[in-house]
Image (spheres, grey):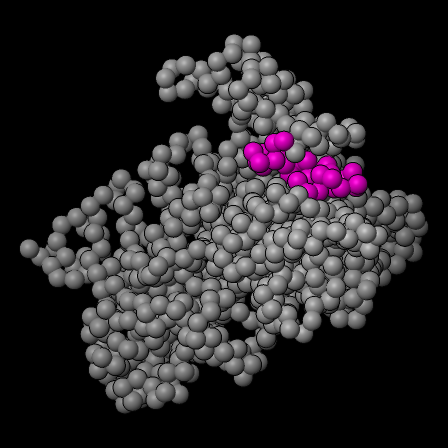
Amino acid sequence: MRLAPAPTASRRFAQGLLALAALVLVTGGGGGRPAFADTLDDAVNGLASGSGEKISAAVKQLATLDDPRAIPALDALCDDRLRAGADGRAWIFDSHTHDLKDPLTGAPAPAGARPAKEVELDNDIRREAQPVLAQLQLASPDKSVRLAAAEELSKAGSDDAAVMLHKAYDKEKDKGVHDALALAVARLDIQSKDPAARLAAVQLIHKSGNDAMLGELQRLLSVGADGQPQEPDAQVRAEAKEALNAVMSRRRIITAVGSVIYGVSLASVLLFAALGLAITFGLLGVINMAHGEMLMLGAYATYAVQTFFQNHLAGAFQYYLVAAVPVAFIVTFAVGVVLERLVIRHLYNRPLETLLATWGISLILIQTVRLIFGAQNVAVANPDWLAGGVELAHGLVLPYNRIGVVVFVVAVSAAVWVLLYRTRLGLNVRAITQNRNMAACVGIPTKRLDAWMFGLGSGIAGLGGVALSQLGNVGPELGQSYIIDSFMVVVLGGVGRLAGAIVSALGLGVINKLIEPAAGAVMGKIVVLGFIILFIQRRPQGLFAIKGRSEA
Amino acid sequence: MLDQGKNLTMIRRYALSSLLLLGASTFGACEKEEPKPAAAPAAPAAPAAPAAPAAPPADDKGPIKVGILHSLSGTMAISETSLKDVALMTIDEINEAGGVLGRKLEPVVVDPASNWPLFAEKARDLIQNQHVAVTFGCWTSVSRKSVLPVFEELNGLLFYPVQYEGEESSWNVFYTGAAPNQQAIPAVEYLMSKKGGNAKRWVLLGTDYVYPRTTNKILRYFLHSKGVADDDIMEKYTPFGHSDYQTIVADVKKFAAGKRTAVVSTINGDSNVPFYKELGNQGIKATDIPVVAFSVGEEELRGVDTKPLVGQLAAWNYFESIDNPTNKAFIDKWMAYVKKNNLPGGDKRVTNDPMEATYIGIHMWAQAVAQAHTTNVDAVRQAVGYQHFKAPSGFDITMDAENHHLHKPVFIGEVKADGQFRVVWKTEGPIKAEAWSPYIPDDKGKIANWLYPWACGNCTEAKYK
């Protein structure tokens, strides 16, 4: 069931390095120093000891040895892939193939190594091992690995690494890595006894605007127990004050930009929940309380496709989402058409009955799914290309799955727009929306189109389900939490208008996210709902109304 | 011919009223944890009770009826269904060993459908019409608060198996889950220690209802007592089912700049998945900002892609991964039961803390009945205190006769990639529950002691002098 961990740069580098190390060994680098190799071997095997003290001693020894050949072992330790073999040696475990490999040579383990036990590590050991790993990785030929390592070091700021850090800083050519290292050096220098070094460090922090060192700046400016400032040098204090202001103002900008971006991301989710409803409710006038369940069915279709790929197409697993999109659409489209044919078409123009009937259908669908898949949520994993995120600025990360949803919703909205406003089918649908009887008189097959459009609305909800499965839970109750939001968006946007749904989703998302930091998530929702009620009082037709004679 | 405009207006009016209705139900949920509509299906296992006054349950030959009051539908079904299953398994186990007092146990399963008022109705039905000798049930605090007056009025007996916020001790309830000092406080102490990461700053994050709010209140007082200033505590709540944690995670990150920070999460159920996903995607690792959760166990992790969670912490009184013969026997029994009854999930089913607590509770009750030689509630209650039982957690644990809570060991575990926990810290032995937290000033001097001469769950002076 579990996915492979993301092939991080460090691992890729580790593999490369392994090859390199082997090469060095073969070409004579490993010729003369068996004693040294033994120490390394002992230390690596020490990583798989039974007690925390022994492991941390081994980590310390690896730090002093400073030998990049230990990288795969340390990386495996931090990732929980290191195993203690029955022969007392450390082995790297491959969770896919269940193979055990030698951490230094990569050779497969002999039978005597099994059964291998997990290493009993905890966060404390990881906190010790990560800076050592980063320290070794600083010598990597790969720029991105060096950058990650430098960032790790600037975070941890271990004193042991000071000299080495300065050396790497002086040697570094790449600008990005150099800057990251500068920050790591600054963290060390700010503790220095030399006021000039402290001043340089503060200036560096000022320039970078990085808020990771906020605590250090505040410490410099604070007043100690003896009533004296922590920082004796007035010049450094003044510079620290300016740096603090710069960091804080930068942080305010990032927060504001972040709120808007998060708002857009929330809007994309709202829009996905509402887009299908904008068609079934907006164009057909059906109050479809089972709309949320279409989202849920779409998400379960994704789960089913994922399971199928796991069992039959493990090689193409990373692309299961691509296959899930049409499957989810077809399934929910079919369910929608069947629903329309069997139930809803008997209830047109009777909104209250439709409301009750679709509510009943939603309960039936929830319980059916619960009977088939169980009451438990099911695990839908992000494929590797949607895991993680891109760091726009320090402290502002945009997760790939959210970017993915935004892109997807834009694509789907565009497709729906084309369908409604650029095709014959869409023209007919809009005619029906404006005047059903007249449309029927001019020969538009209203009954058939109703079924098609209801299917389309459901199918789009199914696509929404695919998107939502990448963000949150997939369980039988998934739809329940989105039905309110989707009605909110459609009613606010103006019934029957696609653009209305888009604008109102965007507005609600951004407003919600702008309120949230100040008022909290609960209050934010209440404020938004109150706002909508007031707005609908003033303008019952919503943001974008269809112009008609009966409405002024 | 229907006027189109009028039609649209009508639709809108319906839309607005349904929106209001829905809105009202969501925000009601802030206090009430997403109530299901009252139209939720009635429990199949609760046959209509005869209208005639039922015969007194005095016959001591037939089977002993045991009530099981867990939601099998609605939001809480996700957690409570396995408690029903494990209760039935335990009853089977006791019956196979000959029952109690030579009589078989007969489970009466009802479904309160995650609907809090319905909990009270079903509890009344179990005691008055079904004449159950004891009831095992409830998960959320709000459901327990809902049935409490019923059990006290009718002198019933309830075993409550879930960790909770404390501040309660009832004559009619035995609490087999953890009180805050058996879960929350040790977890925070662990994060303060060097091994736990020396946290100096605290984010208290929860779902907005009684359990997180009370727990966080206790934790805030506790942190004050350890010298943590209010500036270093951030408290945030989200509504039930919240799925957008972008802002909160960004805030946590900002708050964490400068001082070592830990997050204490009382986020409930479903919301945990988007929360942890967001943490992972925004690049927060357990080594930077550890998150300790009080509501995430093996069962919750079953529906989750655990990749972003590895290394995060949970505090419980039991983990499935605890290695001892009692636990192995417990797990084997459970897996055999799942297989025999073909329960959904099959060999992916797990055991967790509330399941262990249910198992202990039923056994303790059976022991007490055997000792009291009757199922009479008053006699059994006296016998339940001081019962001890070899629990799957590996300890011989005792029911406290004074405050009706179990003495429990505390474990802190790290999430592993396979959805299990690795124990990284544990107490040396079981610790006694504090029904009233000594850290809350209002609770000063409050005593929960049901023994003579105190005989009360919330008083500062003994009832009898």
Query: Residue at point 35% right, 59% down?
Result: B428
Residue B247 lies left or right of residue A342; in this view the side is left
Q: Which residues are magenta?
A: A135-163
Residue B406's quadrant in the figure?
Answer: bottom left
Residue occupying the far left of the picture: B465
| Residue B64 at least partly seen | yes
Residue B63, placed above or below residue A552: below
Residue occupying the far front of the picture: A32
Of residues B69 and B462, the one nearer the viewer is B462
In the image, is residue A535 part of the stretch drawn in magenta?
no
List x then y, in percent, for residue B465. 6, 55
- All told, the count of numbered labels is 0
Residue A342, placed above or below residue A24: below
Residue A353's quadrant in the figure?
Answer: bottom right
Residue A476, placed above or below residue A471: below
Q: What kind of secondary structure does the magenta stretch mostly adopt?
A: helix
Query: Residue at point 52% right, 40% down?
Result: A522
List x then y, in percent, for residue A121. 54, 55
Query: Residue at point 16% right, 62% down?
Result: B451
Q: Quadrant of the N terminus of chain A?
A: bottom right
Residue B16 lies left or right of residue A331; in this view the side is left
Query: Residue at point 27% right, 50% down?
Result: B436
Residue B143's quadrant in the figure?
Answer: bottom left
Of residues B98 and A267, the one nearer the viewer is B98
| Residue B415 at least partly seen | no
List x then y, in percent, for residue B1. 77, 52
Residue occupying the far top of the picture: A234
Residue B59, placed above or below residue A388: below
List x then y, in percent, for residue B318. 43, 63
Q: Quadrant of the C terminus of chain A?
A: top right
